[in-house]
Every structure is written in C-alpha cells, then in structure tokens.
Image (tube, helix red, strand yellow):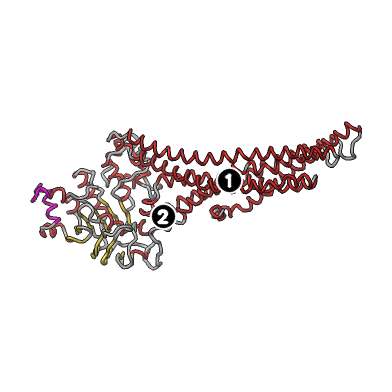
C-alpha cells in the first residue's frame, strides 16, 4: 500500500469525482439490499397467503412487486453513472502518468539510458501504466463493493438473526490471513513478471532496430534462439504468478459453499422452530453471498493491487531519477547569445570511469569565428562538443559563453540558440518537410527549400515524386547515408542560430557536394560562430582556426597554413589525404580519423 499511496497526487485533481463514485455505489448497494428485503417480504406474504388466505396490511404482493421494480431501476441508473465516473478517472490518471513519464524521460541523459533501455521504458509507459489504470477503473469499483457489501450484509444479518450471524462470522479472519499470505507471494511474482516483460520488450526493440545487421550476417537462427530464452523466462514468471492466483480462486468458492451449508442446516432448524421466517432464511442466503462476494473477489483484487504496486514502483524509479544536468540559471545571462566560448582548463571524465576524456583544455573561440576540430578516434572531439550545449555536466568555471559561466544559462536557451547537427543523422518517420522544419513546423516552404539547397538536398528532393511530402520511413530508412546526413544538415541550417555545431556531418557526401555546402555555409554564417568537427582536410582548411586533439588534450592549434608549417599531426594528415604519402606503412591505421 505504501507504493499505491504515491498515486494520491495523481488522484487529487479527481477527488470529487472519486467521492461521487463512492457515494453512487453506496446508494446502489442500499437499493440492492432494499430490493432483496422486499423479495423476502414477498416470499413471506405469499407463504402467509397460501397458508391462511390473509395478507398483512400494506404488504400485498402487488405493492411489494412495484417496490422491487423501482429499486432495481434506481440501482441500475446509479450503477451506470458511478461506473462511468470511476472508469473515466482511471483513464485520466493513466493519461497524466504517461505525460509525466514522457516528460521525465525527455530530461534524462546518457547515464540514465545506459541503465534503463528503451524497450524497458516502453513497457513502463504501456504495460505498467495499463496495470494502474486497470486498478483504478476496476479496483475502485471492487474496493467500494468490498467495503459496502460486508457492512450492509452484517447489519442485516444481525438484525434478522444474531445467533445465525455469530455462527458464520468467526471463520472470516482465517480467510483474511490466507489472503494476506498469498498477497506477499503475488508481490514477488508480479515484480518478476514485469521485469521479464521489460527484458522481452528490450530484446525485441533492439533486434528489430538492427534487423539489417542480423540479416546481413545471417544470424536469424541465433537471434530466434536468443529470443526463445527471453520468451521462456517471461512465460515461466507468468506461470508462477498464475499458479498463486489460481490457488486463491480455487479456495474461495469452497469457503462460500461451507458457509451456505451451515446456513441451510442451522437456519432450517430455526425456521422449523419458528425463530425466523422462510423469507428471513432467503435473506440470509443472499446477504451471505453479499458478505462473501469480497472474499470471492479477493484473489482478483490482490492480483490487481500487487501488480499495480509493482508498476507504481517501476514508474517512480523514473519519476524519482534526478536529471543528470542540473538546470539552475542565474538569471543574469543575456537573452541573446553572441557565441564567444572560453575554455579554462576544461577537463572531463565520464562517470564510472577513471580515464579522463578531456585534459586541461584552455582556448578561446571568438564570436563569429569558424572553428574546426580534428583528432584521432577517441580523442574527445564529440565530448568537447557536448559541453557547449551541456549534454554533459560541465564543472564550474571551466567553460564560459560570452563572459558567463555556461552553467548560468538556462538549458533551453543554450539548446535553442546553439544549433547542433549530430554525428548520427537521426530522422523521424515523417515527411521530409517535417524533418527539416522539425523545431518549427509552421515555417514558410521557401525557407525549407532554401535550407535544403544550402545542404545540397534540393535536387534530390525534386527528384522524389512527392518532393517535400516524401515519407522517409523509420529512422530515415528510405534514404541513403548521404541523403540522411544532408537532411539533418538542412534541419540545423534552417534555424540560423548564433552558434552552429557540425559534428562530422560531411563524412557521407562527395567532395563536389561538400564544396557546395561549404560555400553556402560561408554565405549564411557570416559573423556567426560555426564549430565543425571533421576528418577531411578539404573541410578543415576553410575554418579560421583548427584545433587538433590528441588523447583529450590540445596537440596543435592554428590556421591551416600554420599547422601545415608546423609539420606535426595535422601536416601528416594533410599529406595522407592530398598526396597519398605515408612515412611508415604501419602508421596508416593509427592516423585514420573517426569517419562517423
């Protein structure tokens, strides 16, 4: 119950509707009890009429029948209203939970996604929230039944025959203890089921995302065998849960039958002794069913509660996760970024590792400058870029933007006014128009075509039958690598922000296309800061200055001509690409720079 109590804030906006539903079901139970008391009165009236030919004043069969019809109709209307109210509450809370889950995930970083897979998050967003919705939609109904039914039943039973009531009630605590014990077992198995389901979802999502690799390497049979193990683990966990639930469902009717047998024997003797009437005996049978109804539903209710409790814990594992990048703006930073970066002894080590990725980097990137970065694989290029938009947590006083610590800026401002084209040209499964104008779908079509032209994508788009309305498929699967890269570049260029970061986004384009892009880039980015990571000299030479990283530290810094004259790492790279010259054949692999 501690877990489920955490759902109260989500129920609070609907508290009056919950109260309305509870009152409605209470009224419905009163109607139901009244109807059967009238039935009992009718039985006694018929019995009296059959034995003596007389009727009790005001208790004619016709009057009783009319009363039964009215109470049944009243119950019918109230139950429909109360069920609609409570089920809508379940839907509304599920909606709010999914919104909060999605918002929480959006603010998390790489460590979070390294700990919780995408498939696991999808399971929590769909399956776990569905379990909570089921508890609220059906569980609240069961709850009011389990509260109201015993109260009304016990009152009526003691009113009719205290002796018979005391004969039945002592067995109920035994059932309570049994249900409590089985609830503990269900908690364990429910957690196992949800964890195995998350594994199943993660496995499926990962495999389907890499289906081309699986097929290219002829690993279909191996993947099917791996999936069999994951699927079997889920099935075994579900079997264990079903076994416990089946035991509860099997024992409850047995207890009900024993109680009914006791009423038949003891109550029958009281009828023969004249202590109660036949109608009273009928009332006892019905209200015994009302009393035992919660016990019959106990197995189902416990399953609902335990699975929802596990689901709530899994959701709050995400809700409680603090964002990796704290967003605590000082409120003193300028509203518009100019684009001057100052790195003061910047160092960085990824959490969970000992080896620093960046080591004591100090330099200045002037506003309006075109700045290039190059280095071997693993030299820290992409990590350095992540600091500019705080995709990793920068230490205080190590990175300044326009004279202010980058930590003082709101994250939203940094990521809006610093446009970044990432290494992975991720595209959404939507038309090209929506992918290029992703940050503002209401842009004029002329702006979209202009950015497409700057990214050398106009001719390609014009060749498509549907042009900008062409669907690119999931992750841009219908486009080639170069087309995806240029589409992602157009998405960055269209924003025209004060700072543009290009993380090796020319690796899949030919040199002629690259020259077109660089020429347009120079025209569009006059007096605006542009930071480019590339492994191509043809790209790097256009930059005002070039930084060469070596094992996370500054190895060389200067213009293209200065670095060539320095005859160091950059000069060697220039010879490899322009002259095909290799001083030592065994260095060819070492000098290869990151192509992605």
Between residue 52 and residue 570, name the one nearer to us: 52
Residue 81 as seen in the image, left or right of residue 269:
left
Residue to which mark 1 is pinned? 302
Q: For mark 2, does the 10 Å Cα neighbourhood hold few (<14), some (14 to 19), or many (20 or more) residues?
A: some
**Residue 281 image point, x, y percent:** 79, 39
**Dot 1, how many residues are within 10 Å of its Cα: few (below 14), some (14-19), or many (20+)?**
many
What secondary structure is marked by label 2?
A: loop
x, y (%) of residue 140? 61, 47
- Residue drawn 30% across the image and 51% down it: 421
**Distance Cα–Cα, label 1 vs label 2:** 35 Å
Q: Which residue does the image show at 50% across and 45% down from the upper left?
A: 189
Q: Nearer the viewer, residue 291 or 436?
A: 291
Residue 284 at x, y = what percent? Answer: 76, 41
Along the line of sight, the residue nearer the viewer: 267 or 474: 267
Q: Which residues are magenta?
A: 569-586
The residue at 89%/39% (across/down) is 56
């Amino acid at each position: 119950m501690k877990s489920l109590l955490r759902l109260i804030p989500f129920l609070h906006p609907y508290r009056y509707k919950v109260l309305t539903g509870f009152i409605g079901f209470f009224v419905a139970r009163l109607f139901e009890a009244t109807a059967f008391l009238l039935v009992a009165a009718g039985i006694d009236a018929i019995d009296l009429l059959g034995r003596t030919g007389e009727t009790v004043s005001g208790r004619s069969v016709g009057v009783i029948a009319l009363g039964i019809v009215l109470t049944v109709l009243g119950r019918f209307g109230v139950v429909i209203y109360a069920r609609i109210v409570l089920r809508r509450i379940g839907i509304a809370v599920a909606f709010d939970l999914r919104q909060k889950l999605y918002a929480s995930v959006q603010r998390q970083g790489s460590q979070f996604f390294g700990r919780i897979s995408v498939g696991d998050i999808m399971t929590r967003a769909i399956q776990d929230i569905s379990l909570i919705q089921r508890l609220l939609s059906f569980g609240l109904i069961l709850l009011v039944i389990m509260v109201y039914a015993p109260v009304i039943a016990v009152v009526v039973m003691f009113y009719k025959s205290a002796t018979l009531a005391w004969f039945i009630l002592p067995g109920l605590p035994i059932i309570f203890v049994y249900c409590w014990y089985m609830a503990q077992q269900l908690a364990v198995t429910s957690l196992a089921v949800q964890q195995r389901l998350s594994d199943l979802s993660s496995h499926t999502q990962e495999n389907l995302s890499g289906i081309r690799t699986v097929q290219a390497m002829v690993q279909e049979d191996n993947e099917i065998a791996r999936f069999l193990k994951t699927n079997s683990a889920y099935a075994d966990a579900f079997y264990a849960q079903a076994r416990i639930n089946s035991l509860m469902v099997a024992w409850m009717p047995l207890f009900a039958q024993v109680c009914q047998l006791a009423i038949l024997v003891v109550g029958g003797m009281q009828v023969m002794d004249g202590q109660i009437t036949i109608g009273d005996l009928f009332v006892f049978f019905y209200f015994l069913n009302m009393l035992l109804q919660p016990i019959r539903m106990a197995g189902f209710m416990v399953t609902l509660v335990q699975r929802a409790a596990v689901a709530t814990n899994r959701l709050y594992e995400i809700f409680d996760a603090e964002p990796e990048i704290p967003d605590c703006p000082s409120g003193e930073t300028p509203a518009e970024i100019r684009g001057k970066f100052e790195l003061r002894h910047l160092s960085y080590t990824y959490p969970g590792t000992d080896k620093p990725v960046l080591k004591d980097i100090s330099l200045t990137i002037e506003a309006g400058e075109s700045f290039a970065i190059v280095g071997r694989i693993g030299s820290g290029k992409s990590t350095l870029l992540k600091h500019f938009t705080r995709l990793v947590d920068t230490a205080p006083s190590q990175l300044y933007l326009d004279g202010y610590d980058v930590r003082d800026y709101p994250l939203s401002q940094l990521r809006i006014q610093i446009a970044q084209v990432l290494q992975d040209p991720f595209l959404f499964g939507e038309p090209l128009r929506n992918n290029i104008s992703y940050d503002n779908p209401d842009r004029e079509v002329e702006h979209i075509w202009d950015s497409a032209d700057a990214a050398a994508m106009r001719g390609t788009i014009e060749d498509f039958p549907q042009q900008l309305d062409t669907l690119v498929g999931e992750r841009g699967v219908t486009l080639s690598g170069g087309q995806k890269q240029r589409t992602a570049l157009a998405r960055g260029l269209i924003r025209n922000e004060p700072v543009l970061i290009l993380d090796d986004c020319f690796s899949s384009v030919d040199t002629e296309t690259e020259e077109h892009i660089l020429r347009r880039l120079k025209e569009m980015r006059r007096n605006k800061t542009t930071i480019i990571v590339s492994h191509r000299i043809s790209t790097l030479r256009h930059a005002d200055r070039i930084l060469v990283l070596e094992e996370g530290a500054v190895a060389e810094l200067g213009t293209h001509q200065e670095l060539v004259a320095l005859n160091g790492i950059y000069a060697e790279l220039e010879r490899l690409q322009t002259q095909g010259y290799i001083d030592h054949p065994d260095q060819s692999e070492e000098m290869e720079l990151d192509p992605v």
